[in-house]
Amino acid sequence: MDEIFPLFIEEMGEPIFRQEVPPSSIAHYRGKLPEKLLEYWAEHGWCGYGEGIFWTVNPQDYEGVVASLIEGTPLEKRDNYHIIARGAFGDLYLYGEKSGFSLDIVPYTSNYCGRTHETAATDTDTDKEVQGFFLLMDRESNDFGDFFEPAKNKLGRLEHDEIYGFIPALALGGAIKLDNIEKVKAIEHLTLLSQLSPLEPYGFSDF
């Protein structure tokens, strides 16, 4: 374990679930994702952290979600993106093969934040980028409206394939309140959200 990951766990919380990453998955993403991320996969697996507020995930499970979210947007031709982590409410963190950690998507509000980023020139640069991603990750950015603890207390802890979702969806006029939060299957719900409203950039997004 390097010196960064313990700091990430200290901030985010201990793992609650671990799925071992098969060698075939590491081989599949070699050359597409940074070597340091693949090292973290091999050592830590795909996990939930901090009672389920943040999850590292298998990008292959989310290929359909990515395709549905970015279809018809400028993002579609910008890069090949892979979801490598998500928050308890479905915040998505994507890695672009050319642009690195340059895109976050918030499906429940149909927004994204894109960051202009030059391709890292060396393995050392990409290692630092991965370490920086985990070092800067915090609970607050994954806790929409401070609803995480109330939702967990009301509905129970998330399973590895679940998120907390608003029913009805916000895009359908659903209200942002605890009574409207339910545990839902992550991939199915994210796919549904992608079909309700086109993605729009936040005002502070680079593109």
Image (cartoon, rainbow, N blue to C red):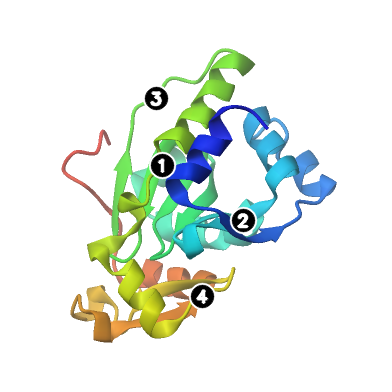
Quadrant of the snapshot with the C terminus = top left
Asked if the residue under mark 3 is in contact with the one under mark 1, i.e. CB atoms within 8 Å, the reply is: no
User: Can the viewer see residue 54?
Assistant: yes
Q: Secondary structure at mark 4?
A: helix
Local packing at callout 4 (Cα closer than 10 Å; few below 14, some 14-19, many 20+) is few
Q: Is residue 199 above or below residue 123?
A: below
Lateral position of residue 181 relative to residue 94, left or right: left
Mark closer to the observer (1, 3): 1
| Mark 1 → mark 3, Cα distance in angstroms | 18 Å
Q: CA distance from mark 4 to mark 1?
A: 25 Å
* Residue 91, above or below 205: below
Q: Looking at the image, is 31 positioned above or below residue 124? A: below
Q: Is residue 151 left or right of residue 21?
A: left
Residue position for label 1: 137
Say which quadrant the N terminus sits in: top right
Residue at 53% over, 69% down? 187
Mark 3: which amino acid? His
Give the label, 3 or 2, closer to the camera.
2
| Residue under numbered circle 3 | 117
Q: Residue, x 16% and y 43% (percent of image)?
A: 203
Circle 1 — which element?
Answer: loop
Task: Please report whichever mark, 1 or 3, sits nearer to the chain's N-terminal start.
Answer: 3
* Total numbered labels placed on residues in the image: 4
Nearest to N terminus: mark 4 or mark 2: 2
Q: Compare residues 92 and 18 and report the one nearer the observer.
A: 18
Q: Which residue is mark 4?
A: 188
Disc 1: CA contacts within 10 A as few (<14), some (14-19) or many (>=20): some
Circle 2 SS class = strand
For the residues labelled 4 and 2, say whether their Cβ atoms are less than 8 Å apart.
no
